[in-house]
Image: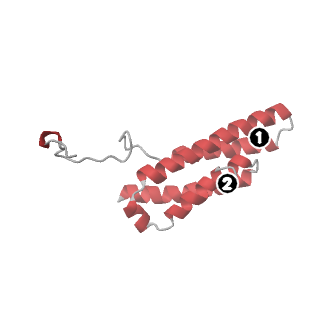
Amino acid sequence: MRLPRFLTPRTEVSAHCDLPCGVYDPAQARIEAESVKAIAEKYQANTDPEFRTRAILIKEQRAELVKHHLWVLWTDYFKAPHFEKYPQLHGLFNEATKLAGASGAKGSVDPAVADQLLGKIEEISKIFWETKQA
């Protein structure tokens, strides 16, 4: 069924997300990842079981936020031309989100795992800021 001519859109528009704010920054993921690392360090330095339980809960929440912020960059900010220019970008996001997830910082209390995550976020950040200069 065709729409009547007066209901047919005359202009097509598109937006990068549901609310086209245009505000993106890998710093959001980095800050949460720094929190994950700090909590892992505090966990290692404390033997109180109640403290450790709380630390794990908060660390897992922060790791989930890291994944969220990375996914927003990956799916909303970066576009096909970015992935063409930086072919390693998909791999970096995949590695970073896995490092933030259950097999990485979310499931570990080892600060070294959080350091690896921070390293991946830094690589993504460098590319992000290069794209902002273009």
Classify residue 9 by image quadrant: top left
Image side of residue 117 versus residue 70, left or right:
right
Q: Nearer the viewer, residue 117 or 129?
A: 117
Residue 33 coordinates in the image, percent (x, y): 62, 46
At 35% from the left edge and 41% from the top edge, which residue is drawn?
Answer: 20
Image side of residue 60 versus residue 16, left or right:
right
At 47% from the left edge and 47% from the top edge, which residue is drawn?
Answer: 25
Distance from disc 2 to disc 1, alpha carbons, whole Å, reads 15 Å
Amino acid carrying mark 2 in the image: Asp
Q: Residues within 10 Å of mark 2 (few under 14, many from 20)?
A: some
Classify residue 119 by image quadrant: bottom right
Classify residue 48 by image quadrant: top right
What is the tally of numbered marks visible in this picture? 2
Secondary element type, mark 2: helix
The residue that mark 2 highlights is 115
Residue 118 coordinates in the image, percent (x, y): 62, 53
Q: Which numbered dot is residue 9?
A: none
Which part of the image, by quadrant, shows the C terminus?
bottom left
Residue 58 at least partly seen: yes
Q: Nearer the viewer, residue 27 or 70?
A: 70
Residue 85 coordinates in the image, percent (x, y): 41, 67
Image side of residue 87 versus residue 48, left or right:
left
Residue 26 at least partly seen: no
Q: Nearer the viewer, residue 120 or 96?
A: 96
Q: Residues within 10 Å of mark 1 (few under 14, many from 20)?
A: some
Tag 2 and tag 1, C-beta contact below 8 Å: no
Residue 10 coordinates in the image, percent (x, y): 16, 45
Image side of residue 42 versus residue 89, left or right:
right
- 91 is higher (above) or lower (below) than 48: below
Earlier in the chain: of badge 2 and badge 1, it is 1
Q: Residue furthest top?
A: 50
The residue that mark 1 highlights is 42
